[in-house]
Amino acid sequence: MSAPVISVTHGVVGYDGRPVLRDVSLTVTAGEVVAVLGANGSGKSTLIRAVLGLVPLGAGSVTLFGRPLRRFRQWHRIGYVPQRLGAGGGVPATVREVVASGRLARRGVLRPPGAADRAAVDAALAAVGLADRARDPVATLSGGQQQRTLIARALAGRPELLVLDEPTAGVDAHSQEAFAEALRDFVAGGGTVLLVAHELGPLRPLISRAVVVHEGGICHDGAVPEPAGHHAEPDHDHVHPHGPDEPAGLWSS
Amino acid sequence: MELFQYPYMQRALIGALVIGLAAPALGIYLVQRRLALIGDGVGHVALTGVGAGLLLNRSPVLVAVIAATIGAVTIEVVRSRGRTSGDLALALLFYGGIAGGVMLVGLSDSTSANLNAYLFGSLTTISPADLTTIAVLGVAILVTMLALRPALFAVSHDEEYARVSGLPVRTLNLLIAVTTAVTVTIAMRAVGVLLISALMVVPVATAQQVTRGFRSTMTAAMALGLFAAGAGVWVAATADTAPGASVVLLAIASFAVVAGAGAAWRALRRRSTPAPEPAPEPHEVVLH
């Protein structure tokens, strides 16, 4: 049997001495589609950031494709989709230019892009339904279209593993469908997926396993939990207020 | 025009053109990572190098390259650590740099005119050896910034993604820091340490008023830098104004013209084509 794609063993992560993940172990094997679920602040995003080496582990270990993270060099096998596109300094960039960055992991820093790179970028743009927006500045796109741009960037590198951080948060229904479609194709091609989600929406049928993170530990690992109570109603739009309605400002009594 | 028959004017023009082309090619990455004023800070530090060079009777430009590189790398280290005190650390570095420069230049037996040459530029005193340095380093900057554009774009656009792509992020960041130091030092002769940032940033700011992509912004910014440098030297020669200030004022005038024209064009288009019906936002809550 081949090595697992992702293996986290007794992972511990803390920010400024405050523990965010305590003793987390997780294994993802090839072909799985694993959703990491949990409330805001549960540590689910930290978990995937630790898997990718974006936050350092306080203790424990991570291996990717059987290699310890520290010695892992085959980054072209991984496609990462962050939560959102950074604002940057305002220099415009076209959708195509952003997606083309996804080829760097394969091509390296020094080699100029060739025909294979252009073909992969075209295919990735088509996969997320943005081929007609390729020449538009990415800042003029809707939030959902920007999210699809980031997915296309990850797909352009032809990865074996996709790691997505809240890919459907704040994304319109049409983009969610287009995104689910792209993910379905990726999984059908034998890809492995690890995604963090607040809610699954149209992705639910694709998920083969769910991991629920609660207060820095894994409290469930197995079938996708069924929504409970009013969350289960078919027309329930999943909304979580992220703060008090009225900001408790300096001038409010 | 006959002024340009003199070799010193030809050297001034060529030097200005090289810098006009190279500065925005680097500046676009600085603007993208919100470090538009970094050139200014590195310039302050370079001034200490100039002072040290004058005091030690070494080539001021050479010592300035070393000082500016140390300064730029320090700034990059502070930035990448992301400490909240980074702001203050930068302030200390900037003002320490300029104060050290003024003090060291004062201690050496050079005149205040000499200090002014580095503060505000002195294109017409470029020697053939200076021009060779400017041309060689300018071409090196251009080639690096253009050849590594995909990687430098990725790092400046989304540093975390670049890390997960396996790019040598730290090396690329240091490369930008060192290139900033080199650009500042060669541009010091043209526009002076106090005006360098303008040549790096203003053409980029002008270009992005009308461009749609990164590559087109870079090309347009380089063209604008070239224009400002060439026209600035010509204005300086014909109207007998300070070359550095003329170049920068022309760059800023281009910005005003392009920004104004862009705004007028957008207003005109809005009036001629009625705004499309705004697409309804997806419902966030079901109201009963």
Image (cartoon, grey):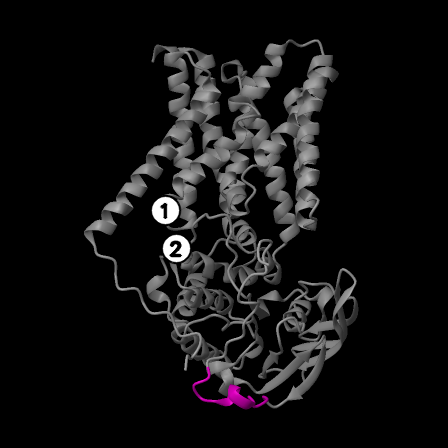
Q: Is residue B57 visible?
A: no
Mark 2 = which residue? A137
Magenta-span inclusion, residue B181: no
Mark 1 = which residue? B211
How far is the residue under mark 1 from the one under mark 2? 9 Å
- The numbered dot on residue A243 is none
**Residue occupying image coordinates x 59% and y 89%:** A225
Residue A210, quarter of picture: bottom right
Indicate the amino acid at tag 2.
Pro
**Residue occupying image coordinates x 62% and y 11%:** B112
* SS class, disc 2: loop
Q: Is A9 placed left or right of B62 in the picture?
A: right
Mark 2 surroundings: few (<14), some (14-19) or many (≥20) residues within 10 A: many
Magenta highlight range: A224-236
Chain that bears disc 2: A
x%, y% of residue A126? 38, 70
Depth check, front residue: B41 or B15:
B41
Depth check, front residue: A151 or B202:
B202
Depth check, front residue: B244 or B284:
B284
Residue A121, quarter of picture: bottom left
Chain that bears disc 1: B
x%, y% of residue A242? 56, 69
x%, y% of residue A216? 72, 75
* SS class, disc 1: loop
Q: Is residue B70 visible?
A: yes
x%, y% of residue B129? 57, 19
Magenta-span inclusion, residue A229: yes
**Image quarter hosting the N terminus of chain B:** top left
Position of A44 relative to B9 (above/below)? below
Marker count (numbered): 2
**Residue occupying image coordinates x 47% and y 13%:** B8
Indicate the amino acid at tag 1.
Thr
